[in-house]
Image (cartoon, grey):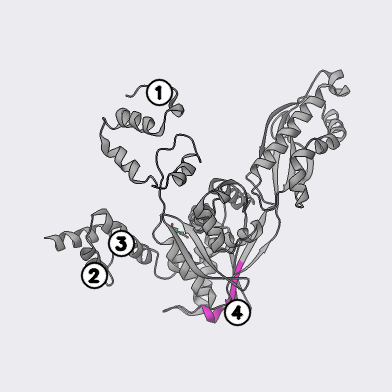
Amino acid sequence: MTNPVSGFSKLSKSQKITWLTQAYFNGNETATEVLQTYWNSNTALQKLHDDFIENTISNYYLPMGVAPNFLINNTLYTIPMVIEESSVVAAASNAAKFWLEKGGFTTQVISTIKNGQVHLNYFGNVTDMTGFFAFIKPKLVASIIAVEKNMKKRGGGLVDIKLIDTTQTLEGFFQLHCTFETLDAMGANFINTCLETFAQTFEREAKTYHLFKSANTFPEVVMSILSNYVPECLVRASVSCHVDQLAQKDVSGRVFAEKLVRAIAIAKATPRRAVTHNKGIMNGIDAVILATGNDFRAVEAGIHAYASKDGQYSSLTHAEIEDNVFKMWIELPLALGTVGGLTSLHPLVRFSFDLLQNPNAKKLMQLVAVAGLAQNFAALRSLVTTGIQKGHMKMHLMNILNGVQATDTEKQAAVVHFTTQQISHSAVIDFVEQLRA
Ligand code: MEV
């Protein structure tokens, strides 16, 4: 058992590491050495990373890869992806190549509205509350003039404020439901500042409102926060082609198309499959979200909530065959930023934006949606034909070899051997042991 530490955040980086080493590693320097191995020798760059969060002790590397040949609305993109799972970038590249020859991906932003709420307690007369809201609304709008100035100049800002009576769900619960256009910013800071300003104005004015005073019952603010559920910030991406163009090695185009449609129908029919189906989609989405410095937790939370919008967790992708044309599409909410946050700070994020030809937020929504659709197509293609293990284990082979510290010669021999043999963890270990014997 270690003792609690006080003032930890005030310690220098090396003091923090010394404390950790003594408290958890019996003073063994190996742990310190591991942390130091990942420090950047460029001190300015290291300082930048140190300052992203509190108590930084090292940098945690993830591979950054690229998937080329994405034809999206007739423009070619190479998509940056940050992910640790072996087969994801390869799958994205394969799907991109597959659809490149069939006209590529088509995308469309459906809406871009974000939202947040001031959550209120009010146990009085509902008509007093609605009367107060009608009276206060212009004052709420006016209270954010200074906060909104720059956003408004660029064409964004507050869209509307509505009072929502949620007392049927939770006694005394009302909300100020506020909608915003935040353009190229993800908008979390802007929205939260607006909401907190509304909350202060609301509470202050409520104190002197005659009906609340005569009933001696006043509303109070519980909290003010943006919502990561953004079903009014939607994007769609699709692919389509004649079924004959889908022919696989041992499967006709029509049969393959029918298998894809069926696989998606299964994901719609049962959450057990839908969760894994959508997890595969998130492999693509999160990888681009990370490469472009966006908030993948916000994106994940919002997308999974959207997948449940009809009352049961379901597939984010859809497919149909009509008049011999196969069509597959994805529709999902994405609140993304191309300015603010990490976007201008992290050099690799800057690199990603340059690689993507400096997209605005709407364009980035489309690229991310395509990455999700491509990943789902690639996963389903494997699942309904060869199964995923073949491709997955091929990509995972190097991880297993690295796990047993295989030499370059051993790796080369293993790659040749497992071209024709089934790859499993134990088979690879046995193979390396035989080589060494
Ligand atoms: C693995 O990371 C993702 C898959 O399970 C997705 C799917 O099953 O559709 C292959």
How busy is the neighbourhood of tag 4: few (under 14 within 10 Å), some, or many (20 plus)? some
- Magenta residues (range): 238-246
Discs 1, 4 touching: Cβ within 8 Å: no
Q: Secondary structure at mark 2?
A: helix
Q: Residues within 10 Å of mark 1 (few under 14, many from 20)?
A: few
**Which of the two labelled residues, at mark 1 and mark 2, occupies the earlier sequence position?**
1
Report whether residue 55 is seen.
Answer: yes
Nearest the camera: 377 or 64?
Answer: 64
Let me know if residue 72 is in the magenta part. no
* Residue at the image point whose x is 71% and y is 56% from the top: 111
Q: Earlier in the sequence, mark 3 or mark 1?
A: 1
Front of the two marks 4 and 3: 3
Judged left or right of residue 95, residue 150 is right
Real-space Cα distance between discs 2 and 3?
Answer: 11 Å
Residue type of the residue flagged with mark 3 = Leu
At label 4, which amino acid type do we have?
A: Asn
First in sequence: mark 4 vs mark 3: 4
Q: Work out whether mark 2 precedes mark 3 in sequence or the reverse, and give the earlier one.
A: 3
Specify the quadrant of the image occupied by residue 228: top right
Q: CA distance from mark 4 to mark 2?
A: 42 Å
Relative to 28, is 305 on the left or the right? right
Give the residue number, with chain letter if any, for mark 4.
Answer: 324
In whole angstroms, how far apart are the C-alphas of marks 1 and 4?
68 Å
Residue hosting label 3: 397
> Of the residues tagged 1 and 4, which is closer to the observer?
1
Give the residue number, with chain letter if any, for mark 1: 5
Cα separation between marks 1 and 2: 53 Å
x then y, percent, for residue 155: 77, 52
In the rendered structure, does residue 244 fall within the stretch colored magenta?
yes
- Reply above or below: 226 against 234: above
Residue drawn where x is 87% and y is 32% of the image: 131
Q: Which residue is mark 2?
A: 417
